[in-house]
Image: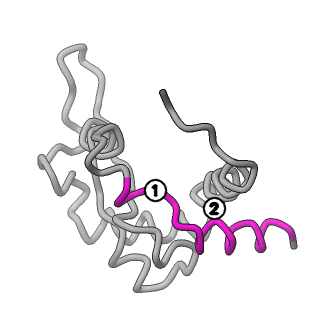
Amino acid sequence: MAKQKSPEEVKAYKAYQKYISSPEFEAVRSAVFQRDGYRCVCCGRTEQDVNSKGKPYKLNAHHCSYQHLGEHNQAEIDDVHTLCNLCHLDIHMNRANYQRFKFTEEWIKKANEKSDK
């Protein structure tokens, strides 16, 4: 059974969603996609590749950690990698990866402080 998220975690997740939709993160995403040659660093797929249903794969910008999240600088760019939607889903759905990619208490506090301003 999935653990219930605390109000602080819910608030931080909303702040994260807002950030990854921001123009600041769009600049990070663009720099990462360009650096990675517009292909998934795990499997090599591009947005020109299609799945068995004829639908194109989507590229995602994935934070390897949340250590530099929101800095929109070279450190954040270095911490983000291009993944296709399938590889990205696999990373987040694999329980062994969950601890590596969950928000840290420090980031939750930082995100909530920013969203309160």
Q: Which residues are magenta?
A: 99-116
Q: Is 19 situated above or below 84? A: below
Camera-side residue of 98 and 26: 98
For image coordinates 40% across by 63% down, the residue present is 63
Residue 113, position as x, y percentages in the image: 78, 73
Label 1 element class: loop
Which is in the foreground here, disc 1 or disc 2?
A: 1
- Give the labeled residue for mark 1: 102
Q: Is residue 78 left or right of residue 5?
A: left
The dot on residue 85 is none
The answer to if 91 sits in the magenta stretch is no
Q: Is 65 situated above or below 45? A: below
Residue furthest to the top in view is: 53
**Spatial distance from mark 1 to mark 2, Cα to Cα?**
16 Å
The answer to if 111 sits in the magenta stretch is yes
Of the two numbered discs 1 and 2 on the same chain, state the one appearing first in sequence: 2
For image coordinates 57% across by 58% down, the residue present is 20
For image coordinates 21% across by 53% down, the residue present is 39
Identify residue type, mark 2.
Tyr
Residue 110, position as x, y percentages in the image: 68, 74
The dot on residue 19 is 2
Q: Is residue 115 left or right of residue 47?
A: right
Label 2 element class: helix
Q: Residues within 10 Å of mark 1 (few under 14, many from 20)?
A: few
Q: Is residue 90 left or right of residue 71?
A: left
Residue 55, position as x, y percentages in the image: 30, 22
For image coordinates 69% across by 71% down, the residue present is 109
User: Which secondary structure dominates the residues rendered in magenta?
Assistant: helix
Residue 54, position as x, y percentages in the image: 24, 18
